[in-house]
Amino acid sequence: MQVPQESPWFGKTVTVNELRWYNQMPVIFLKDVEDRTAAESLIKAILLVHADTTVLPTESDAWYDHQLVGLKVFRNDSEVGEVVRVDHLPSQDMLIVKSGDNEVLVPFVKAIVPEVDIKAGKVIVTPPLGLFEEIEE
């Protein structure tokens, strides 16, 4: 954790017992932080997480955000953009694709994103008309 030197938490590590989502915000519960007073002593603390990014998800159609960011996005064999981030919304995940000067929110569902190829560095999309272009009336 990154805290000021005068903090009782300086130089200590913590263990996350649980992660819950409240109003689209992550809330963690830490081992040995049992009451409000202890929790308030961690206000403005920065939690640094050591994660093994070499371990991949076991499901065939699951990816970590860091694996998706930077992938080129293709539609009908033409590059339309690049994944710049993944937003996790209550209804579904969204790939945020930088396309020209715009950011396009692409629902990360099989019907619109049928293929993700991490090794090839690309995502295939089959978006509905109007997602990447203006519809002329």
Image (cartoon, rainbow, N blue to C red):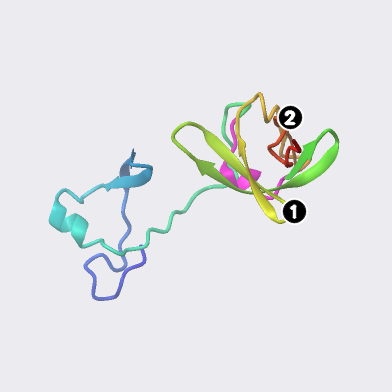
Report the amino acid beneath label 1. Answer: Gly
Q: Is residue 78 magenta?
A: no
- Crowding around mark 2 (Cα neighbors within 10 Å: few <14, some 14 to 19, many 20+) is some
Task: Identify which residue, 44 or 79, lies in the foreground.
Answer: 79
Task: Identify which residue, 17 or 105, lies in the foreground.
Answer: 105
Please report contact status of discs 1 and 2: CB closer than 8 Å, yes or no: no
Q: Secondary structure at mark 1?
A: loop
Which contiguous range is marked in magenta?
Answer: 62-71
Q: Position of residue 44 (x, y in %)?
A: 30, 64
Instruction: Give the overall secondary structure of the magenta segment.
Output: loop
| Image quadrant assignment for residue 133 | top right
Tag 1 residue:
100
Q: Identify whether 4 is placed above or below 9.
A: below
Q: Position of residue 100 (x, y in %)?
A: 75, 53
Q: Position of residue 9 (x, y in %)?
A: 26, 64
Instruction: Kindly identify which numbered label has been placed on residue 126.
Output: 2
Q: Position of residue 113 (x, y in %)?
A: 68, 30
Q: Residue furthest top?
A: 111
Report the amino acid beneath label 2. Answer: Thr
Q: Residue at x 72, y 41 (%)?
A: 132
Q: Secondary structure at mark 2?
A: loop
- Crowding around mark 1 (Cα neighbors within 10 Å: few <14, some 14 to 19, many 20+) is few
Q: Residue furthest right?
A: 77
Task: Identify which residue, 89 or 65, lies in the foreground.
Answer: 89
Left-right relation of 21 to 85 = left
Image quadrant for the C terminus? top right
Left-right relation of 119 to 29 = right
Q: Residue at x 38, y 58 (%)?
A: 47
Q: Residue at x 78, y 44 (%)?
A: 80
Q: Identify whether 13 is placed above or below 57.
A: below
